[in-house]
Amino acid sequence: MAKLNNENVDWQIVRYSEIIEHILRNYHIKLKKELPEIEKLVYTIFKVHFEDSGDILEKVHRLFGQLKTILESHIIKEERALFYMIMDYEKEPSEELLGDIMKIVENVEGDNKEIVELIEGINKVTKNYLVPSTGCPTYVNTYNKLKEMGEGLIEHIAIESIMFNRLKNK
Ligand SMILES: [Fe+2]
């Protein structure tokens, strides 16, 4: 299967199985690796910079914790159920299967909405990842990773949303 990149791809016509492959390869694998790493970094800077930036980092720590929890659940629901069901539907469409898919889609879309709100919350609390003058290299690294994760999530969710909308319009 050819590798897709985000540019010049019309997600309205790409096969569902290829979209899923793209999401798994470019977003889910990375998230599973990075969530625990970023969690440790966020915890570390919260502890080390408690005196100078504790008020901001307490909020970042809390928002990231919520984000990680929802993302783990998002990944499980998609990888253990939804994506298989969509690939089955592509091979053999049926009204019944589409109905079951829609129930999970609704649930995952609720999660995705919360994910976007949490990213916006982190953007706001960190003033778009503005490192304070007291920030050390770990602080910079943590903010860079958080920013990159947030940007990846926005793309990831946008592509999923196109796929879900295509299924809704069946
Ligand atoms: Fe996903």
Image (cartoon, rainbow, N blue to C red):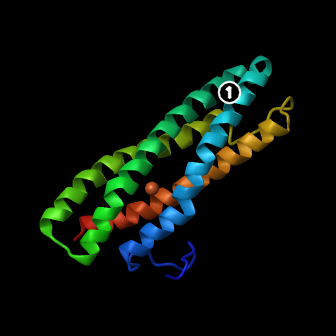
Name the amino acid, label 1: Leu
SS at badge 1: helix
Q: Position of residue 7 (x, y in %)?
A: 58, 75
For residue 123, which quarter of the picture?
top right
Compared across the picture, whether 11 is left or right of 62 comes to: left
The extreme bottom residue here reads: 2
Taking the spot 41% from the left edge, 43% from the top edge, the residue there is 73
Q: Name the residue furthest left.
A: 96
**In x, y percent, where is residue 68?**
52, 39
What residue sits 71% from the left and 36% below the top? Answer: 41
Which quarter holds ligand 1? Answer: bottom left
Q: In which quadrant is the C terminus drawn?
A: bottom left
Residue furthest to the front in view is 80
Up the image or down, 18 lies above or below 126; here it is below
State the residue in front, 46 or 75.
75
Q: Residues within 10 Å of mark 1 (few under 14, many from 20)?
A: many
Q: Which residue is mark 1?
A: 57
Report the side of 70 relative to 41 (left or right).
left
Q: Is mark 1 within 8 Å of ligand 1?
A: no
Residue 123 appears anywhere in the view: no
- Check the image and report above or below for 26 versus 135: below
User: What residue lies at 77% left-to-right and 43% top-to-bottom?
Assistant: 141
Quadrant hosting residue 130: top right
Q: Is residue 152 visible?
A: yes
Where is residue 129? Give x, y as percent: 71, 41
Instruction: Count up the numbered dots.
Output: 1
Q: Is residue 107 left or right of residue 111?
A: left
Q: Residue 30 or 137: which is nearer the viewer? A: 30
Measuring from the top left, give residue 14's x and y in whole percent: 41, 79
